[in-house]
């Protein structure tokens, strides 16, 4: 379990994170989403003991990272890319990390095969592509067989087979009872495997909950003869309306209700379509609302 409780981090007069609270539960993939500068990386750095909070707490299995006994056995992290020495081979990098962590040498070969780098094991990491470096970073995070994975933009540089590999890895980890907290800008891909979503902006939580609940509602795409009059009529009935040229995106109404409101307002309807919302829709709507 990951628990973020009333977390605040202040740099001078700037609050990078303000009163952030959420959990990432075992057996589930939690997506931490936000624009650049939203506070995602600050939250993850505090969680991993790389920065101290001004107030609040970030806990892994009920304890701060620095309080964990042999922390790399509890949590594996990908927080930055390119941390391997460019002159080392992939095998040498993992072997060094295994020695430092006290892990058996046999895990190195198994992990290189698991992440699909067995054919590049003796190649200098400086010659690796970004996607290969990402795979190596994930292998490093898995050395201690941790129950918790914290991954900051692990999909950067991955090709479609790499994305499929990462998706299966995370789903297998949570199926075995593990916890995953992942940040990513690839919202369309993330939607395929996250269970819970936390959206952060300007250091604050903008929305959080199960993905199925957040995207389960539908919005209406409406095009009519008088968009302004139609929008006003919808809003008077408690709907949310987002104009996009002549098209209105309407939340909070059923198609039947929207049709009746348009009829009462005497506005001709040319198009009325119920659209399921996607993660990107939710992210953009709450981000733009700020």
Image (cartoon, helix red, strand yellow):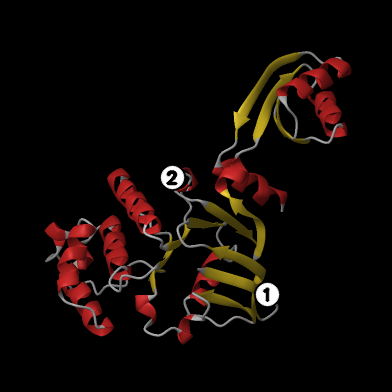
Residue 123 in the image, given as x and y percentages of width and height: 14, 64
When the figure is inspected, residue 89 is found, relative to residue 275, above or below; the finding is below
Residue 273 versus residue 35: which sits nearer the camera? 273
Kindly identify the residue that appears in the image at 33 percent across and 69 percent down.
141
Relative to 174, 90 lies left or right: left
C-alpha distance separating marks 1 and 2: 33 Å
Dot 1 falls on a residue whose secondary structure is strand
Work out whether residue 225 can be spotted: yes
Kindly identify the residue that appears in the image at 68 percent across and 28 percent down.
220
Kindly identify the residue that appears in the image at 14 percent across and 59 percent down.
118
Residue 12 versus residue 262: which sits nearer the camera? 262
Q: Residues within 10 Å of mark 1 (few under 14, many from 20)?
A: few
Relative to 286, 98 lies left or right: left
Looking at the image, is mark 1 or mark 2 nearer the viewer?
2
Relative to 142, 241 lies left or right: right
Residue highlighted by disc 1: 14
Kindly identify the residue that appears in the image at 19 percent across and 68 percent down.
90
Q: How many marks?
A: 2
Work out whether residue 89 can be spotted: no
Tag on residue 134? none
Residue 16 in the image, given as x and y percentages of width and height: 63, 71
Residue 139 in the image, given as x and y percentages of width and height: 27, 65
Q: Earlier in the sequence, mark 1 or mark 2?
A: 1
Is the residue under label 2 in contact with that under label 1 (CB below 8 Å)?
A: no
Tag on residue 189? 2
Residue 242 versus residue 164: which sits nearer the camera? 164
Q: Residues within 10 Å of mark 2 (few under 14, many from 20)?
A: some
């Amino acid at each position: 379990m990951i628990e973020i409780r009333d977390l605040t981090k202040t740099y001078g007069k700037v609050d990078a994170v303000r009163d952030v609270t959420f959990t990432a539960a075992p057996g589930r993939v939690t997506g931490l989403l936000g624009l650049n500068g939203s506070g995602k990386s600050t939250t993850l750095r505090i969680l991993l003991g790389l920065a101290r909070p001004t107030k609040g707490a970030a806990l892994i299995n009920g304890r701060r990272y620095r309080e964990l006994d042999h922390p790399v056995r509890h949590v594996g992290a990908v927080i930055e890319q390119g941390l391997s020495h460019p002159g080392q081979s992939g095998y040498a990098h993992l072997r060094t990390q295994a020695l430092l962590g006290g892990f058996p040498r046999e895990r190195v070969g198994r992990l290189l095969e698991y992440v699909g780098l067995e054919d590049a094991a003796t190649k200098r990491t400086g010659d690796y592509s970004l996607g290969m470096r990402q795979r190596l970073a994930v292998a490093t995070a898995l050395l201690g067989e941790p129950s918790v994975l914290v991954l900051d933009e692990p999909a950067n540089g991955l090709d479609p087979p790499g994305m499929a590999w990462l998706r299966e890895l995370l789903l297998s980890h949570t199926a075995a009872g593990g916890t995953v907290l992942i940040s990513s800008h690839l919202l369309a891909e993330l939607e395929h495997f996250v269970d819970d979503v936390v959206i952060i902006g300007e250091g604050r939580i903008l929305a959080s909950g199960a993905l199925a609940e957040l995207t389960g509602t539908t919005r209406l795409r409406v095009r009519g003869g008088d968009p302004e009059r139609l929008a006003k009529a919808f809003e008077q009935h408690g709907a949310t309306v987002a104009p996009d040229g002549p098209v209105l995106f309407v939340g909070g109404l059923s198609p039947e209700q929207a049709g009746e409101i348009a009829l009462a307002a005497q506005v001709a309807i040319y198009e009325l379509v119920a659209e399921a919302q996607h993660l990107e829709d939710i992210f953009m709507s709450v981000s733009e609302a700020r």
